Image (cartoon, rainbow, N blue to C red):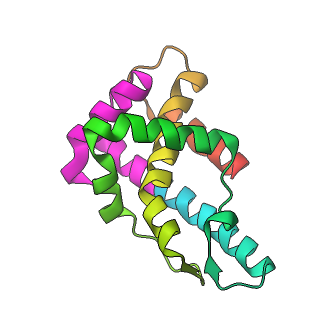
Amino acid sequence: MIAGIAQFEKFFREAAGLDIDKSDIRRIDDLANRQMHRFLVMARRAARMNGRDIIIEADLPITAGLEARMKKFEELDETLRLADILEKLAELPPIGADLAADVEEMLPTIMGAIILSMAELFPVVDPHVKNPSSEHWDRVERIYDILM
């Protein structure tokens, strides 16, 4: 994710007024990829329950909150072009199901929405945070572990 450090710094500033640095980039990458994997595992479950080995859009566990962040991410991404970076970086482990073409096209936006929701959680965890500490990251990660 090193190639996109400047874009991610700007994204976190615009999304939540946060200043992140290179050490935060690894945490973003790890947490976002782990959450995307969990997301797709749940989609695989829905596909299998419907007798399919291919994940279609209807299988995706998109909540109202995630859908809102997908729309907001697309708006923010107009100038940042993070989706291009995310498309190349989403190295997901095998999940035992194929993805429909339209689902594959959605992955950068879903990943962007996950990252946006991360950014938006920091001010909820600590309204005064400007530069997230390890403690802030641990709290955000714990929230994701509880909800996902």
Secondary structure mostly seen in the magenta stretch: helix
- Residue 76 in sight from this viewpoint: yes
Residue 88 vertical position relative to residue 18 in the rendered view, above or below: below
Q: Quadrant of the N terminus?
A: bottom left
Rendering quarter of residue 54 = bottom right
Give whichever of 120, 58 is nearer the camera. 58
Residue 34 vertical position relative to residue 138 in the rendered view, above or below: below
Residue range in magenta is 1-30
Q: Position of residue 92 (x, y in %)?
A: 46, 71
Q: Position of residue 62 (x, y in %)?
A: 65, 52
Give whichever of 111, 32 is nearer the camera. 111
Q: Position of residue 111 (x, y in %)?
A: 46, 53
Q: How many marks can you see? A: 0
* Residue depicted at 50% across the width and 53% down the height: 110
Residue furthest right in the image: 49
* Residue depicted at 41% across the width and 48% down the height: 27
* Residue depicted at 56% across the width and 56% down the height: 35
Q: Is residue 12 magenta?
A: yes
- Residue 21 in sight from this viewpoint: no
Residue furthest top in the image: 128
Residue 143 vertical position relative to residue 48 in the rendered view, above or below: above
Rendering quarter of residue 16 = top left
